[in-house]
C-alpha cells in the first residue's frame, strides 16, 4: 500500500497560493486519490494544530505584511505625473489584503473538512508520542524541533503496527533542512533531496518531495506528454483546414470532419505514448486501480445508455461535462485522479437517469 504524508507547510501553500507547486487543483487531485483509496493519507495531529495556529494568526500576520508593503510603496518617490497611480496601488493593497484573507479562509474550510473526514488516517498526539518525541530530542537525533520530532514519531508508531507487507511512504515537506539530505543535482541542475538516513529508521521505504506537484507525479496521464509531431497526413489535413477557413467554410461538415480527423490522430499517438512510456512505470497497485475504475465507468455508461430516459442528443451532449471534458476514448489514458472523479461523476449521472426511469414507470 502507498501511504502519503503532507506537512503543514505544504498545506499552508495551498491556503496562501503565494508560490507555485501547491495549487488548489493539485489538492483536489490529492483528495480524489485519497478518497478513491489509491493511497492513504496519514495526518498527525500536530499538522492540524499548526494549521489552526496559522488561521488564528492570519489576520494579524496579513496586516503586518501588507503594512510593510504599503510602507515601502509610500516611501517610493514617483514622478508627480503618476502620483495618482501610487495612490491607486495603495488602495488596491487594502482590497487585496481582504481578498487574500477571504480566499485563505475559504480554502482552509475545504482543507480542514477533508483532514477531518473518514478518508484520511488520523495519527493522534498521545502522551506516548509526546514522550517518544522528547526522547528523540534528548538523544540529539534529527529532526531537532518538537513538532518535527512528533511527526516522525507519529509516523514510526503507525508503521510499527502496520500489517502491509510492502508499505511505501511519500513524504512531502518544504522543510528539507530538518528532514532531508541534498543529493547531487541532475542534468537539469535542479536541487534534489532524499529523506535523511538517520530519520528513516523505523519508517518504510520513503520518498521525499518538496512540493505537492512533485509528489503527484506518481499519477500521470496523457496530458503530461508533449504534442506529437506532425506527419504527412496531418500536415495535409492542417493545410485543408486553413484553406477552408480562408474561404469562410469553417462551419461545414467537411471542416468539422477534418478537425475530428486531426484530433483522432493526436489521441491515437498520445494513447500509444502513454502505454509505452508512462503506464509501465506506474506502481502496480495504481495500474490495477486505474483498470478497475475504468471498467466500472464503462459498465455504468452502458447502463446509462440503456435507460429509457437517455436521449442520444441531449444526454450525449451533456456527457462531456460529466466526463470532465476528457474524450470518452481517452479516459483510460488520463490521470488516476481524473478517472476517480469521473467514476464518481458517472455514478451520479446514472442515478439521475435511473430515477427518471422510475418516474416514467410510475406514469
Image (cartoon, grey):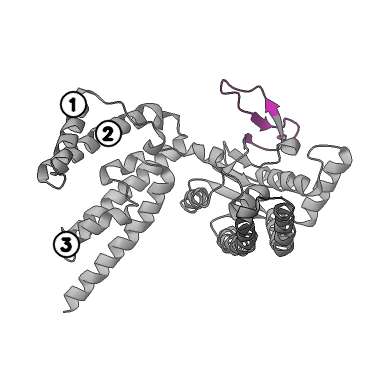
Residue 314 on image: x %, y %: 19, 61
Residue 262 on image: x %, y %: 22, 35
Between the C-alphas of marks 3 and 2, the distance is 29 Å
- Image quadrant assignment for residue 221: top left
Magenta-drawn segment: 182-208
Between the C-alphas of marks 3 and 1, the distance is 35 Å
Q: Is residue 325 left or right of residue 178?
A: left
Q: Is residue 273 left or right of residue 359?
A: right
Q: Is residue 322 magenta?
A: no
SS under mark 3: loop
Q: Is residue 186 magenta?
A: yes
Asked if marks 1 and 2 touch (Cβ < 8 Å), the reply is no
- Which residue is situated farthest in the right direction here? 138
- Image quadrant assignment for residue 82: bottom right
- For marks 3 and 1 on the same chain, the one whose residue lies earlier in the sequence: 1
Magenta stretch: dominant secondary structure: loop
Front residue (pair 43, 271): 271
SS under mark 2: helix
Q: Identify the mark at residue 233; answer none if there is no mark.
A: 1
SS under mark 1: helix
- Which residue is situated farthest in the top direction here? 187
> Which residue matches tag 2?
266
Residue 295 on image: x %, y %: 31, 46
- Which residue is situated farthest in the front direction here? 81
Q: Is residue 39 left or right of residue 56?
A: left
Q: Residue at x 23, y 70 (%)?
A: 356
Mark 2 burial class by Cα count in 10 Å: few <14, some 14-19, many 20+: some
Q: Identify the mark at residue 311; answer none if there is no mark.
A: 3
Amino acid at each position: 500500500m502507498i501511504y502519503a504524508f503532507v506537512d503543514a507547510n505544504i498545506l499552508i501553500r495551498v491556503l496562501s497560493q503565494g508560490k507555485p507547486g501547491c495549487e488548489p487543483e493539485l489538492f483536489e487531485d490529492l483528495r480524489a486519490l485519497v478518497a478513491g483509496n489509491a493511497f492513504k493519507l496519514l495526518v498527525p495531529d500536530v499538522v492540524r494544530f499548526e494549521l489552526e495556529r496559522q488561521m488564528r494568526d492570519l489576520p494579524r500576520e496579513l496586516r503586518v505584511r501588507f503594512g510593510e508593503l504599503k510602507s515601502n510603496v509610500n516611501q517610493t518617490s514617483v514622478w508627480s505625473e503618476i502620483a495618482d497611480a501610487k495612490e491607486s496601488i495603495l488602495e488596491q493593497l487594502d482590497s487585496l489584503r481582504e481578498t487574500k484573507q477571504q480566499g485563505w479562509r475559504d480554502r482552509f474550510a475545504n482543507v480542514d473538512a477533508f483532514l477531518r473526514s473518514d478518508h484520511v488516517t488520523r495519527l493522534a498526539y498521545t502522551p506516548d508520542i509526546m514522550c517518544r518525541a522528547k526522547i528523540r530530542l534528548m538523544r540529539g537525533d534529527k529532526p531537532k524541533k518538537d513538532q518535527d520530532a512528533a511527526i516522525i514519531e507519529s509516523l514510526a508508531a503507525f508503521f510499527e503496527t502496520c500489517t502491509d507487507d510492502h508499505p511505501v511512504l511519500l513524504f512531502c515537506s518544504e522543510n528539507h533542512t530538518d528532514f532531508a539530505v541534498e543529493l547531487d543535482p541532475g542534468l537539469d541542475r535542479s536541487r534534489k533531496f532524499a529523506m535523511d538516513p538517520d530519520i528513516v529508521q523505523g519508517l518504510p521505504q520513503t520518498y521525499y518531495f518538496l512540493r505537492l506537484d512533485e509528489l503527484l507525479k506518481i499519477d500521470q496521464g496523457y496530458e503530461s506528454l508533449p504534442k506529437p509531431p506532425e506527419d504527412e497526413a496531418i500536415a495535409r489535413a492542417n493545410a485543408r483546414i486553413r484553406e477552408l477557413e480562408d474561404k469562410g467554410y469553417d462551419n461545414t461538415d467537411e471542416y468539422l470532419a477534418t478537425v475530428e480527423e486531426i484530433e483522432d490522430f493526436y489521441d491515437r499517438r498520445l494513447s500509444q505514448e502513454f502505454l509505452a512510456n508512462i503506464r509501465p512505470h506506474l506502481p502496480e497497485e495504481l495500474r490495477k486501480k486505474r483498470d478497475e475504475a475504468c471498467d466500472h465507468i464503462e459498465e455504468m455508461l452502458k447502463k446509462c445508455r440503456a435507460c429509457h430516459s437517455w436521449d442520444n442528443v441531449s444526454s450525449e451532449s451533456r456527457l462531456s461535462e460529466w466526463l470532465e471534458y476528457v474524450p470518452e476514448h481517452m479516459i483510460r489514458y488520463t490521470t488516476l485522479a481524473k478517472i476517480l472523479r469521473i467514476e464518481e461523476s458517472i455514478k451520479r449521472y446514472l442515478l439521475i437517469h435511473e430515477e427518471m426511469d422510475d418516474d416514467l414507470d410510475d406514469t
